[in-house]
Image: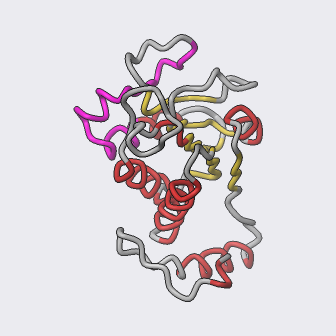
Amino acid sequence: MLNQVVGVDLDSGVDVRRLKAVIATAQDEGRGGLPVVIGSQPDRVLEELERFSVVEVGPGLPIGPQGNVAAVVGLHGFSDTPGAPDASFSMQMIDDWGIDDVMASALDLASRQKRALAVLFDLAVLDPAFDDERTTPGGLDLRRLFQAARACGRRPDVAAAGFVKAASGVNLVHTVLSFCAGLAGR
């Protein structure tokens, strides 16, 4: 995809073409790349991230195979959702603290585990106003979702990312590109 990019300028003001240089440098230094998993089933995407400490931005998945979900951001309703880890951040907390502070707290908590850090964006976290297949009231708006993705991409300790597609492929593309804009800003 990056070889085809003539110029992408997201609302964040970051030119994603810089990613080509970041990837080339990582490959030259033998560091490989940052694994990105995209799918339509949250549990299958989470399985691909089982060796990581995962911060899930979504409505809350059951704890992964190794208990690797360290924090959940964007829980609909109350934060005492059954099966949610202790480090759960509800929509009310996002409204009170702001998405940047919530993401920083969730990533900081997850980074305390002895695993590399990954983020999982389940687009079911969106409010039904932004995704017509969603029926659970409450959720993130698009601007906060993209802001969270950029913030995660900027974090140098994020070593992998997963994206779960909901109804809108356009929202998925914008979320991935927002994450890439954060990567380009590293």
Q: Main secondary structure of the magenta part?
A: helix
Instruction: Name the residue rendered at 76%, 36% in the picture.
Output: 44
Instruction: Please check the rendered image and state whether residue 182 is part of the magenta-colored stretch, yes or no.
Output: no
Drawn side of residue 170 relative to residue 62, left or right: left
Quadrant of residue 40 within the rendered picture = top right
Residue 131 sits above or below residue 60 on the image: below
Return the residue found at the far front.
Answer: 132
The spot of residue 111 in percent (x, y) is 53, 38
Drawn side of residue 50 relative to residue 125, left or right: right
The span shown in magenta is 83-105
Instruction: Name the residue rendered at 62%, 50% in the picture.
Output: 161
Quadrant of residue 11 within the rendered picture = bottom left
The residue nearer to you, when weighing 165 against 186, is 165
Instruction: Name the residue rendered at 47%, 63% in the picture.
Output: 182
Residue 133 sits above or below residue 16 on the image: above
Instruction: Please check the rendered image and state whether residue 96 is part of the magenta-colored stretch, yes or no.
Output: yes
Query: Which color scheme is applied?
Result: secondary structure
Residue 61 sits above or below residue 29 on the image: above
The residue nearer to you, when weighing 154 against 76, is 76
Return the residue found at the far bottom.
Answer: 6
The spot of residue 107 in percent (x, y) is 47, 40
Instruction: Name the residue rendered at 64%, 43% in the picture.
Output: 116
The residue nearer to you, when weighing 68 against 31, is 68
The spot of residue 25 in percent (x, y) is 66, 78
In the picture, the quarter occupied by the N terminus is bottom right
The spot of residue 36 in percent (x, y) is 68, 55
